[in-house]
């Protein structure tokens, strides 16, 4: 196994020798599932004809700018489902992390199959629990993307982190309120909120949802920086360490969205010090969709509710449990762990 832990080495594997390291190293759990490798983008062992075909179908239906534009109503509808659900369940405890995940999953499943995967409103029901347990199990066992290709790494999105810094939190909310200015919230307005965008990028930097990306495989023997990497070696890109490399990031471990304000660094894999979606041939084709989904979901939750830490808690407060309590008395939503 080889691990690339610096931007320079990541570039060697994913740009200079991209084709050679474009194979996938599959977790053994998939080896007994016949047919799955040819019908999945992420699990395809190499960049075969079927992988190319699946990627181009995905491009047409989901990933392209045109497809993203025509799916904007789905994002809005599913996010408003969640907002309305929270509104109508005043004072009740909600596991926000799971509900955000379910909402994001429903956006993708509706774009692909015109159906919801989760019933947000029946979330306490057995079906919902079973589905969530299954999703968690798949994520745990495979350490790759969620339910194969289209249920991606969304469980890692940490809304909580945004909430801990009150100053930043207020700044984002003010920016969104000003952009909306009496209008209805929509993604065009949200995309003009530069500080908010920078917060999402900074969250993805410090909390890389797939810290080692998805394992790559050498399809042939190759020499990299004078080391011989044998055919079939597993190659991991340590996107987590790269995003905190002090040679590239000033005050690397601090949450500072401002660093993205006047920066050309984006999430499209062209800057090797920032690879939340990977780079090269096997880069996440859903990066644009993912960013829009997160933007709409987090933007709406920030805009439609007031959020605060438990009484007296400050920015050093650490969460211990997954549940986020929610209480919308008098239009206030209070999120806290216990
Ligand atoms: C925050 C959300 C997401 C993150 C952080 C993320 C990240 C990643 C990463 C790191 C990879 C592997 C890159 C590599 O191996 O070098 C990947 C692959 C992939 N992602 Fe995403 N992803 C997200 C959302 C999405 C969404 C919304 C979709 C679909 C609409 C999607 C579809 C895929 C597919 C199909 C692959 C496999 C690509 C291949 O093997 O050729 N992802 N993603």
Image (cartoon, rainbow, N blue to C red):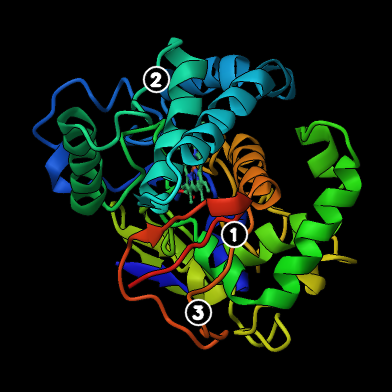
Point out residue 165 in the picture as x, y percentages from the top left corner: 65, 77
In this view, 262 is above or below 60: below
Q: Which residue is mark 1?
A: 275
Point out residue 328 in the picture as x, y percentages from the top left corner: 52, 51
Mark 2 is surrounded, within 10 Å at the Cα level, by few (under 14), some (14 to 19) or many (20 or more) other residues, namely some
**Of residues 93 and 258, which is closer to you in this image?**
93
Task: Find residue 123 and report its image quarter.
Answer: top left
Q: Which residue is mark 2?
A: 116
Task: State the residue at coordinates (47%, 84%).
Answer: 317
Task: State the residue at coordinates (30%, 22%).
Answer: 38
Mark 3: which secondary structure? loop
Mark 1 is surrounded, within 10 Å at the Cα level, by few (under 14), some (14 to 19) or many (20 or more) other residues, namely many
Disc nearer the start of the sequence (3/1): 1
Mark 2: which secondary structure? loop
Mark 1: which secondary structure? loop
In this view, 86 is above or below 68: below
């Amino acid at each position: 196994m080889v691990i690339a832990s610096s931007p320079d080495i990541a570039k060697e594997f994913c740009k200079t020798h991209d084709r050679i390291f474009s194979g996938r190293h599959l977790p053994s759990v998939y080896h007994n599932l016949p047919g799955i490798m040819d019908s999945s983008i992420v699990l395809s062992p190499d960049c075969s004809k079927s992988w190319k075909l699946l990627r181009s179908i995905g491009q047409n239906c989901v990933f392209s700018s045109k497809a993203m534009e025509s799916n904007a109503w789905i994002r809005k509808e599913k996010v408003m489902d969640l907002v309305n659900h929270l509104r109508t369940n005043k004072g009740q405890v909600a596991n926000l992390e799971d509900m955000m995940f379910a909402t994001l999953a429903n956006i993708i499943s509706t774009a692909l199959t015109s159906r919801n995967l989760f019933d947000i409103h029946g979330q306490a029901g057995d079906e919902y629990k079973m589905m969530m347990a299954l999703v968690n199990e798949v994520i745990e066992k495979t350490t790759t993307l969620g339910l194969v290709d289209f249920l991606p790494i969304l469980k890692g999105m940490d809304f909580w982190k945004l909430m801990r810094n009150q100053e930043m939190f207020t700044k984002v909310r003010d920016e969104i309120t000003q952009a909306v200015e009496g209008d209805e919230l929509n993604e065009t307005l949200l995309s003009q909120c530069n500080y908010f965008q920078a917060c999402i990028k900074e969250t993805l930097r410090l909390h890389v949802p797939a810290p080692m990306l998805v394992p790559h495989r050498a399809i042939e023997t190759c020499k990299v920086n004078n080391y011989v990497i044998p055919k079939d070696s597993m190659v991991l890109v340590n996107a987590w360490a790269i995003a905190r490399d002090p040679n590239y990031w000033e005050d690397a471990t601090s949450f500072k969205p401002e660093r993205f304000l006047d920066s050309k660094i984006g999430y499209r894999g062209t800057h090797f010090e920032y690879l939340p979606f990977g780079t090269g041939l096997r880069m996440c084709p859903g990066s644009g969709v993912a960013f829009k989904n997160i933007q709409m979901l987090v933007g709406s939750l920030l805009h439609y509710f007031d959020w605060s830490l438990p009484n007296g808690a400050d920015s050093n407060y650490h969460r211990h449990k997954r549940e986020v309590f929610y209480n919308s008395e008098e239009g206030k939503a209070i999120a806290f762990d216990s």
